[in-house]
Amino acid sequence: MLKGLALTPPVIGRIAIGKMVERNGKRLPEKDDEFTVTSQIQSKDGWIPHPLNESLRKEPGQKLRSIPIRFLFDDPDLNFRVKYTMFDRQSGRPVCVGDGENCRRATSAGMQAMPCPTPMGCAVGIAGHCKPYGRLHVRIGDEDELGSFVFRTTGFNSIRTLTTRMKYYQAVSGNRLASMKLELRLRGKSTTQSHRAPIYYVDITPASGATLENLVQEALQARDQQLAAGIDQVLLDVAARAGFALGEFEESEEEGAAVVEEFFSSEGDDAAESEAGATAVDTVSLAQKLQTRSHQRGSGGCSATAAVKT
């Protein structure tokens, strides 16, 4: 087995709520108000749609705002990998990954373990546009029971909502999250930071028409059937956890280049996901504006920055 190579869930497709478009000779991320399910193949016009992108729609041309899913693992942290992440914007190579307490950073002296004070408290993170970056792995249909479709996000609303929902469903099902029939659902809201324009984030709900009680009962029955068939979900979680731990970083340079283009490029910082004002970079920009305004009024900038942090 190769050392330093993270073993991550096999990806057979992507889920997005936006797309890349070309404007003035530049490729930029554009917001959307529906899901798009794609293959892992790109053409000159962008990612090629997966057949599920049409078959999941109730009517041809209808907007896709909910997707029936199951999770691969019972542990939410295995299904949804969230870290503060900084990429080299030229090569797409991950250079620093942390959890708000500790990080692993690629330096000229090699890989080093360091404290992670979050992007707001890290001079390198602010300069390098470090962001919370999440990858959600889900199953769609029964075509490949150990393959996943990945939804990537740097949006705070999606990260918080997805994490919370999975932990709640894990709790009420008695740690049978992988046996629950659920849906990814696109929700919208407006905030003062979005200038009251709609912004979109991703949520998890029971499958259409199901109550929480029915959902849990079906999960219990499904888990009993798995055990009777000899499928060991516990050992699957153990194998996934060990695979993630094998590598320093989970993203390769090849994958990182596409991630940087969509979520970490300078032009796309405010447009990568339809969640205006939700990323660490946006908060930093606000702090800088307040600090500049404070200097113009003849007062110190530290108090303005502290006010934003609280």
Image (cartoon, rainbow, N blue to C red):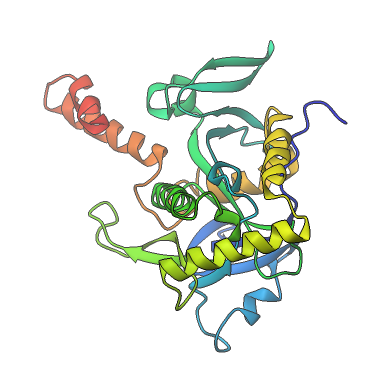
Q: In the displayed structure, would residue 172 be above or below residue 141?
A: above
> What residue is shown at x 82% (from left), y 26% (from top)?
3
User: Is 276 displayed left or right of 258 in the figure?
Assistant: left
Number of marks in picture: 0
What x and y, as percent, mark residue 294? 17, 27
Position of the N terminus by quadrant: top right
Q: Based on the displayed image, in which of its 4 quarters is residue 47 positioned?
A: bottom right
What x and y, as percent, mark residue 70? 60, 62
Q: Does residue 48 show up?
A: yes
Q: In the displayed structure, would residue 83 be above or below residue 271?
A: above
User: Is 53 displayed left or right of 12 in the figure?
Assistant: left
> What residue is shown at x 67% (from left), y 32% (from top)?
249
Q: Does residue 183 show up?
A: no
Q: Based on the displayed image, in which of its 4 quarters is residue 244 positioned?
A: top right
Q: Nearer the viewer, residue 307 or 285?
A: 307
What x and y, as percent, mark residue 275? 39, 54
What x and y, as percent, mark residue 96? 59, 27
Position of the C terminus by quadrant: top left
> What residue is shown at x 51% (from left), y 84% (from top)?
62
Residue lying farthest bottom? 59
Q: Nearer the viewer, residue 268 or 80?
A: 80
> What residue is shown at x 71% (from left), y 33% (from top)?
242
Residue lying farthest right? 1
